[in-house]
Amino acid sequence: MKKWWKQAAVGVGLMTMLAGCSDGESASTPKDGKVVLDMWVFGTTGYDELAKAYMEENPDVQIKVQSTEMGDHHNNLFTALSAGKGAPDIAMIEVGEIERYRDAKDRFTNLNDLGAKDLQANYLDWVWNVGSSSDGEFVYGLPTDIGPTAMYYRKDVVEAAGYPTDPAELASTLATWADYTKFAEEVKAKTGKPVVDNAELIFNAKRDQASEHYFNRDNELIVEENAEIRAAYDYTAELIQKGTVGNMPLWTPEWGQGMADGSYATLLGPAWMQGVVKGNAPDAAGNWLVTTMPEGAGNWGGSYLTIPKESEYSEEAYEFISWLLTPDNQLNSFKDMGLFPSTPETYEKEEFKSYTDEYFGGINTAQVFADAAAQVVDVYKGKNYLLVQGEIMMALDNVLNSGGDPDKEWNDAMDRIKQRLERE
C-alpha cells in the first residue's frame, strides 16, 4: 500500500456518514428492485437534471447525485478510497487533482474493461490521455468538460492604446508574444494600465504552449533544463520589469473589481471564466470581448467521471456515465450550465455553431474556445506538478513585489524544488 494511502486513513467515520447509510445498509443496496447509484460531484454541473432524464428511460436505476465544495469533495473521496469503504459508485475528479490518484489504480475500475476504448474517438486526444495511464491501457475516467484558454480583453482599454478592437483584427495584430510585448508597452504608455492582471496568468499561458512542463513521462524532474519553461519564466519577468504586469492576484476582491473597472487590458483565461467576468463586471457588457491568444492555447480546468473499485454496480455506473457524456448531452450541459464540451462532434452541431453571447459583443465565444481546444498541447504533469508550480510562482512574486533578480529567484526556486522532492 502506498504511503499516502496510509496517511489518509483518518476520517473513515466521516466518510461512512457521507455515504448516507443511516439505516446501516449500503446506499447502493437495491431497493424495490432498483439499482441505486451514488454519484459524487462538485460545483454546479446540472447532472442531477440529466440523471432524472436517464432514470425516466431506465426505471430500474436510481441515481443519487451529491454535490459538495471542490476541496471537501476531493478530500472526502481521498479518505474513502484510502479506507476502502464509503466511496460512491461514480466520483468526479478535477483535472488538477487526478495526478493525486495515479498511485491508486487498484482503487478504480479500469473503464477499458467496460468498453471505454470504443468511446475514445469521441473525445479530444489530449483530454483522453490525461485521464488514462501513460501506456493508455488503464482509463481512470471519462472526460466531462474542459477549459481551453483564450484572450479576454477590454475593448475600451485596447482602443485607448490605439489597437483594433475587432476580435479577428486584434488576434492578427497580436499573433506572437513579441507582438504582445509591444502591445503591453503601448497600453502602459497610453493608458497607464497594465496589460494583464497578474504574473500567474501570463506565465501559465506561455507554459501551456510548451511541449513538456516540469516532469517527463518517466516522472523525472526536467524543469531546470526545460528551455521552454525557462522562456515562459523569463518572458513574464521581462514584462514585470517593464512595469506592464498588474498586481491583482486571482480571486481577490481587487482582481474582481479590476474586471468591472477595466483596470487591465487582457485576461488570459479559460472558457469557464466567462461566468466569472460576467459575475464580477455585470455592467461591462460589450466592453469585454474574447479572441485567440498569441501562438496557441492551453487548458485550465475540466473533470473526469470515475468508478471506484468498490462499487457493486460498475456496469450500471458505466452505462450511465457513457450516456451522460455523449456529444448530445455535452451540448445540453453547455447550453444549461456552460460546461465546455470535451467531444469535438459537439462543436459541429448547429446550436453550438450558431451560439452567440451578447455580453461579449454578440460574438460566438464557443467557436473561439473550440478553436483553442484544438490547439492544446498534450503534456504529462506528474503528481508533484503543483509543488513545482508553487515555487515558480513564488519566484515571480518576489520579482514583482520585492524587485528580486529574476535569475537568482529562478535558481533559488530550483533549489527549493529539489529539496522538497527529496523529502517526498
Image (cartoon, rainbow, N blue to C red):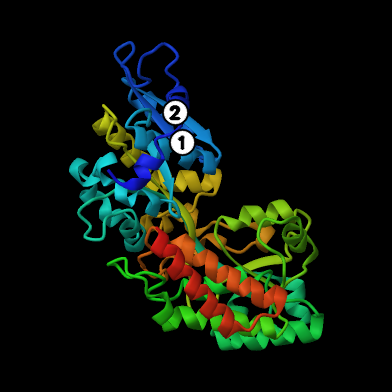
Q: Earlier in the sequence, mark 1 or mark 2?
A: 2
> What type is the residue that disc 2 sits on?
Met
How crowded pointer 2 is (Cα within 10 Å; few <14, some 14-19, many 20+) is rated as many
The residue to which callout 2 is attached is 15
In-image side of 360 versus 147 (left or right): right
Secondary structure, mark 1, is helix
* Location of residue 401 in the rendering, given as x and y in whole percent from the top left corner: 71, 73
> What type is the residue that disc 1 sits on?
Asn
In-image side of 277 versus 201 (left or right): right
* Residue closest to the eye, 262 or 103: 103
How many numbered dots are placed on residues in this image? 2
Residue 299 visible in rendering? no
* Location of residue 9 in the rendering, given as x and y in whole percent from the top left corner: 39, 35
* Residue closest to the eye, 98 or 349: 98
Q: Find the distance from the CA under tag 1 to the CA under tag 2.
A: 6 Å
* Location of residue 71 in the rendering, given as x and y in whole percent from the top left corner: 53, 43
Q: Are marks 1 and 2 in contact (CB under 8 Å)?
A: yes
The residue to which callout 1 is attached is 76
Residue 131 visible in rendering? yes
Q: Is residue 261 above or below residue 211?
A: above
How crowded pointer 1 is (Cα within 10 Å; few <14, some 14-19, many 20+) is rated as many
* Residue closest to the eye, 412 or 130: 412
In-image side of 163 versus 273 (left or right): right
Q: Residue at x 31, y 38 (%)?
A: 307
